[in-house]
Image (cartoon, helix red, strand yellow):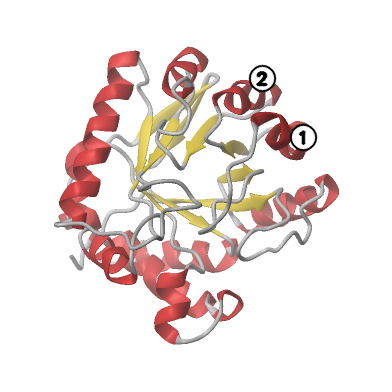
Amino acid sequence: MSSKNTVLPVQSLIQSKGRLLDLSTPVIMGILNATPDSFYTQGKDSDTDGLLRNAEKMLEEGATILDVGGASTRPGAELISADEELKRILPAVEAINKRFPEAWLSVDTYNAATAKESVAAGAAIINDVSAGSLDDNMLQTVAELKVPYIAMHMRGTPQTMQNDPRYDDVVFEVRNYLRKTVDACTELGITDIIIDPGFGFGKTKEHNFALLSQLHTFRMLGKPILAGISRKGMIWKTLGTTPEEALNGTTALHMVALQQGANILRVHDVKEAVEVVKLWGELG
């Protein structure tokens, strides 16, 4: 896939709280971690003031969506309660929504209670790494909240997902899982669904690159696609570096993701990702 004109069309508009977000041109989602054990930020600037500073910088650099997370989902991480998660993220959600009301604020959570409280505090999108598999109440809660839902594929839990993950056909199996998830969401009345193949979540390096090279096939589901590959192991392990040294590799694969039809890039480094989108926009 070498041209943006060869991918299948998907839903291009999502709505939340009376606002429309146009995804016909790819947008950038900036990562804001309110957790002390992220694989990359390692707790730096995870307090509310630090998150506000980072939010301002990301918006100035061109981010459209800000994704606030309070529970680490790095390989080996243990699940935390909604109460603990809310202590970490609610002050940030409230502060960011007050300071930057124009931003599209997403909350990265697998807890339905966190989703409900976060939307009440100003969040406009729920980003669930478990696609509802870790909380039976999640899909119904999102349907009642009437906000867009990002459903990601993950095999197992963060604690177990990298324990020898195996697939007969990773692209087919992940796509089929997301198709069933989209159907379940639709049946409940969730109309704005974004799909995420879950790079690094229960996949080997080979699985991740297979998914990236075939990402365009996920557009047959008719939903916008989120690609979250920023500074992940598929990049730095391949290059023999570290997450801190993986920006150049991330940028290279972001162009591939866009050529494969990604609508949202979830990133640590907004400026560089915005530049990729601008260059992609000049391709025929």
In the image, what residue type sits under mark 2? Answer: Ala
Q: Which residue is mark 1?
A: 87
Residue 71 in picture, x, y percent from top left: 63, 45
Q: Residues within 10 Å of mark 1 (few under 14, many from 20)?
A: few
Q: Residues within 10 Å of mark 2 (few under 14, many from 20)?
A: some
Q: Which residue is mark 2?
A: 120
Residue 96, compared with residue 227, is above or below; it is above
Mark 1 and mark 2 in contact? Answer it, CB < 8 Å.
no
- Residue at 28%, 63% in the rendered image: 212
Indicate the quadrant where residue 186 lies: top left
Residue 46, compared with residue 131, is above or below; it is below
Nearest to viewer (mark 1 / mark 2): 1
Q: Relative to residue 19, is residue 114 drawn left or right?
A: right
Q: Which one is nearer the viewer's eye here, 56 or 151?
A: 151
Residue 98: tell me if it is visible. yes
Q: Relative to residue 106, is residue 264 drawn left or right?
A: left
Q: Secondary structure at mark 2?
A: helix
Q: Residue furthest right?
A: 49
- Residue at 49%, 51% in the rendered image: 158
Indicate the quadrant where residue 178 lies: top left
Q: Which one is nearer the viewer's eye here, 274 or 237?
A: 237
Residue 70, compared with residue 235, is above or below; it is above
- Residue at 53%, 19% in the rendered image: 18
In the image, what residue type sits under mark 1? Answer: Lys
Tell which circle, 1 or 2, labels the residue nearer the N-terminal end.
Answer: 1
- Residue at 22%, 45% in the rendered image: 175
Q: Which one is nearer the viewer's eye here, 261 or 169?
A: 169
Residue 2 in picture, x, y percent from top left: 20, 68
